[in-house]
Image: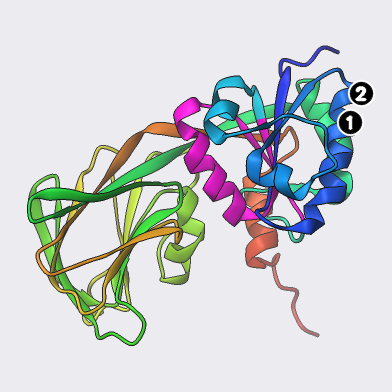
Amino acid sequence: MSSSFKTIALIGKHRNPDIVAPLLSLGRYMEKRNLEVLLDQATAAVVAEARYPAMTMEEIGVRADLAIVLGGDGTMLNIARKLAPFNVPLLGINQGRLGFLTDLSIDSMLETLGSMLDGQYFKERRMLLYVEVVSDNVPAYSALALNDVAVNRGVGGNMIEFEVHINGEYVYSLRSDGLIVATPTGSTAYALSSGGPILHPSLDLIALVPVSPHTLSNRPIVVGPDAVVEILMHRTAVARVHSDSHSHYDLRQHDKVVVRRSPHTVTLLHASDHSYYRMLREKLGWSGIPRNQI
């Protein structure tokens, strides 16, 4: 059966020699199917013996029909942000335990990939956030986030103080260790560990989850996808804003952090038998109905 994907980009975890063998196996498999194989430059530097063209992320975004990411969820988050403007579908293969985003096993990847390349898959669109920091009325920082945008106190710092506005309306002032603004994708990450709700990835919603608030009545709230969240810093200590725990910016008093939905989205491919709820059970250790003890 002819595949709708003709050019495949293989992208591995940065500077990880363990990706070499499985990545070369993937490359050989793609060649047997008469597919063009590309590598990103960082992966090519590790897989020196590969004869595939090494390209920048921008070049991959223009040429690739599909990007296969070999690594963990952190690797997928990084690649997803970079390729989001190009709308390249992503498929994740996890080297260790299956992740929330990289749900294919390295042990069965070729068999599963064969079925997916033959059309047995489904697409899942994930929303992104765009964050901008305005300092002294001048844009000072911006980034995309697939999981979350988090404002946090720094290591060793005291609680920070800020006020939150949604669509221009004052919501509350908060004294806490921080605030997480999360997508449904990020609802099972940092937001979950801070007591936030799990949002199904098919939803376009934004969760605001306080981190260790001084007042226990400050609870997570969920708003619509068109909400514009503004965080005005009052007491910052050594506060920072993080995008997917990847890039960051040091905040000062009176800085304003503005978070809104990005016009870009990420498309993930899953095998046809993939189940989001099964993945939650496995990752979160949910058990079945307990049996009565005799």
- Reply above or below: 24 against 272: below
The residue positioned 85% from the left and 47% from the top of the image is 22
Mark 1 packing: few (<14 Cα in 10 Å), some, or many (20+)?
Answer: some
Q: Which residues are magenta?
A: 67-95
Residue corresponding to mark 1: 29
The residue positioned 81% from the left and 85% from the top of the image is 294
The residue positioned 75% from the left and 50% from the top of the image is 46
Could you tell me the amino acid type at mark 1? Tyr
Residue corresponding to mark 2: 32
Mark 2 packing: few (<14 Cα in 10 Å), some, or many (20+)?
Answer: few
Q: Quadrant of residue 235?
A: bottom left
188 or 152, which is in the foreground? Answer: 152
Where residue 26 sits in the image (x, y, percent)?
A: 84, 37
Where residue 176 sits in the image (x, y, percent)?
A: 25, 77
Could you tell me the amino acid type at mark 2? Lys
- Reply above or below: 111 against 101: above
The residue positioned 44% from the left and 56% from the top of the image is 244
| Element under disc 2 | helix
Where residue 17 sits in the image (x, y, percent)?
A: 78, 57
Q: Is residue 19 magenta?
A: no
Asked if residue 33 lies left or right of residue 266, the reply is right
Q: Quadrant of residue 267?
A: top right
Q: Quadrant of residue 161?
A: bottom left
Residue 198 in sight here: no
Asked if residue 272 lies left or right of residue 134, the reply is right
269 or 57, which is in the foreground? Answer: 57
- Reply above or below: 130 against 243: above
Asked if residue 285 lies left or right of residue 212, the reply is right
Q: Is residue 88 magenta?
A: yes
| Element under disc 1 | helix
Q: Are marks 1 and 2 in contact (CB under 8 Å)?
A: yes
Residue 247 in sight here: yes
